[in-house]
Amino acid sequence: MIRMENLTKVFDTPGGDVTAVNNVNMEVPAGEICILLGPSGCGKTTTLKMINGLIPKSAGKIFIDGKDTDTVNPVQLRRNIGYVIQQIGLFPNMTIEDNICVVPDLLGWEKAKSRKRAAELLELVNLVPSAFLKRYPKELSGGQQQRVGVIRALAADPPVLLMDEPFGAIDPINRAVIQDEFLKMQKELKKTIMFVSHDIDEAIKMADKVAIFKDGILEQYSAPDDLLARPTNDFIASFLGQDRTLKRLSLLSVGDVKFGEEYKVHGEGDLANAIGQMKELGHQNIVVTGPQGRARAFLHLNDILGKKGVIEEYRQALPAVANVKEDLKTAVSTMFRHDVSWLACVDDDGFYKGYITQKAISHALSAIYRDEKQNTLR
Amino acid sequence: MRATTSVLLVFAAGIMFSLLLLNNDGLLIQIWINFADDVDFLIRQHIYLVVLSGGLAILIAVPLGVWLSRPYMRKFAEGAMQGLNVGTTVPTLAVLALSMSFLGIGVLPAIFALWIATLLPIVRNTYVGIREVPGFLIEAATGMGMTRTQILLRIELPNALYVIFAGIRTALAINVGTVPLAFLIGAGGLGELIFTGIALDNIEMMLAGAIPVALLAMLVDFIFLQIQTWSISRGVNPLR
C-alpha cells in the first residue's frame, strides 16, 4: 500500500520557484496497479521519484505499508522497492544473471539462493535461463532487455514496484506482448505498483486505478471505466479523447452485456414455440442448441412466420459467435466483419450463454450517462 | 583489429632487422658484441625510470580523475580539464628543462617531469570515461539502493575502464618515448647511447640505444593491451 499526504515538490529554478507537484493526496491499495497519466511536465514522474527519494520532496508525507518513509534510511528504502526506468538501465558491464541479482547481492543474500532466483525469474518471462544467464545486455534484443529490466526489479521480491514508462522504449507489437505477460505475472504476484505512462490505452488496459495529473495537480483518481464514463472536467475529457466511449469497449466483457440466456430452441422443437419466444424476447432471431446445450444454428422470424414443420428445416448456420470472456471491442469487430447486428454468446466449451446485440452494447455504454441525467432531474 | 596491427608491426620490424643483418655485414651482431654490456646496464635504468614515473602517474592520475568526476567537483572540473589540456601541449623536452631548473639534475627531476607528462592523459581519460557513463545507469543504480561508493566501484569504474586503459596506454607510450631525453638532465637510460651515438656520428651506438627503446615501447603497449583485453568485462569491451 502506498499513501501520499499533501505531497508537494517545489523546484528552485533561476526563473523562480516552480511547483511541480502540488499537494497531492492519494492511496494505492495493496496489490493494485496505479497508473499516473498526464501530459509531459505534469508532475507524474516527479511524484513517482519522490516515493523512493530520488527526488527529495518539499512537503508532505509518504507511507509505504503504513510506514512513514522519512523514518527509513533512503538506501534501505530503495532496496525494498522495485524500480524500473524507461531506458531499462541494465548495467552493460554485468551479465544478465548479475544484473538480476543486483538487489539480492546488496541485501546480502547467499549466492546460490540469488542465482537460483535469477533462473526462476527468467523462466517466468519465457527466457531460457541456460541461454541467457551468462549473456551481456548488448547481446539481447530490446524486448528481451525490457523483460530482464522488469524481473530485475522483482528479484528481491519487494512488495512495492515503481515503474517509469517501463514499456515506452519498445515497438507496439512487442509492447502488447510484454504488457500481457506482465499482467499475467501481476495476477500471481499481487504487487503494489505505481506506474508512469503517457499512453492512455496502456493505462486503460493495465491499471486498476488511473491518476490524471495536470500542472502538478491530481485532477482525477479513479478506475479506468469510471474515468472514461465520468471525466470530472473538460481537461480530462479532452485528454482522454473524443473516442473515450469507444475505449470503454475494451474494458467491458461480452458477459457484462449479454442477455436472454433462457431463450433458445432445440432442433426438434416446434415453430410456434420459437415464434413465441422471439416475441417475448423482442428479437427477430433465436439460437438453436444441440442436445448438450451447445449453440448450433439460428432461426430468423421472417423465415418461419406462417410456415409449418420442424425447426431443423429452417435453421441457418451461425455466422460467428462471441466468447463471454472476450471484450466488447472484439465482439463489435466480429459483428462488423460479418455484417450482423447480433451474436450468440458461448463459453469456452461452446455452450450457449445468451445474446449480444449492438443495441445492448450501446445501451450499456450510455447507461452511466443516463443514470446521471436522471439523478440531476430528481 | 589492434591485435592485427601489433602483429603487422612486429612482422615489419622483423623484416627490417633481417635486412640490417644481411646487408650490413651482420650489423646487429656487431652491435650486440660491442654494446651488450652497456645496453644491459642502461636498459635497467631506463626501465626503472619508466616503472617509477609511469607507476606513480597511474597511482595518482586515476584517483585524481575520479575525484574530478564527482558531482561536487563539477564546478571546478571543467576548468581543471582545460588546464590539463593546456599542460599536454607543452613539449616534454620543455617540461624536462623546467623540471631541471627547479630540482637540479639527476633522477629526481627526470622522474618528476616524466610523471607530469604521463599524468595528464590518464587524468583526462579517467574523467571523461566516468562522465560518459550514461546518467540513467546511475539513476537505476541509485533507485535500486546502491550507495555512492557502490555506484562508483560497480557501475562507473567498470563502464569507464576501457577509456581509462586507453589513456594509460597513450600515456605510457609517451613515457617510454620520452625517457631517452632524461639522459639530457643526467638521469641515464638508453638515451645515453642514442645521444652519444648522434654526437659521435656512430650509427652502431645510436642503434644500440634506439632498437631497445623501440622494443621496450612495443612490449609495454603489448602488456597493457593484454591487461585491457582480459581485465575488462566482455559486456563493455570492444576488444572481445
Image: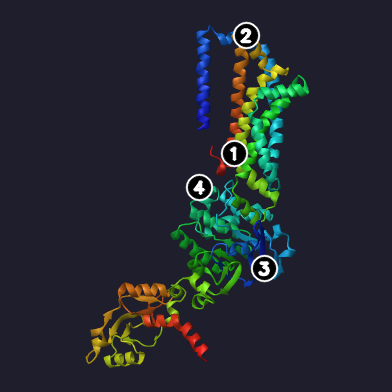
Q: Amino acid at mark 3?
A: Leu
Q: Amino acid at mark 4?
A: Glu
Secondary element at image label 2: helix
Label 4 to label 2, Cα distance in Å?
56 Å
**Which mark is in front, 3 or 4?**
3
- Would residue A168 be seen by someone viewing this image from the given angle? yes
Residue B101, position as x, y percentages in the image: 75, 22
For mark 4, name the chain: A
**Mark number displayed over residue B94:** none
Q: Are marks 3 and 2 on the same chain?
A: no
Around disc 4, counting alpha carbons within 10 Å, would you say few (fewer than 14), some (14 to 19), or many (20 or more)? some
Label 4 to label 1, Cα distance in Å?
19 Å
Q: Are marks 3 and 4 on the same chain?
A: yes
**Mark number displayed over residue A139:** 4
Colour convention of the picture: rainbow
Instruction: Say if mark 2 contacts mark 1, CB within 8 Å.
Output: no
**Mark number displayed over residue A7:** 3
Residue at (66% x, 16% y) in the render: B191
Relative to B30, say whether B164 is above or below: below
Residue A259 placement, left or right of A97 = left
Relative to B234, say whether A271 is above or below: below
For mark 2, name the chain: B
Q: Which residue is mark 2?
A: B33
Q: Which residue is mark 1?
A: B162
Q: Are marks 2 and 1 on the same chain?
A: yes
Residue A33, position as x, y percentages in the image: 57, 69
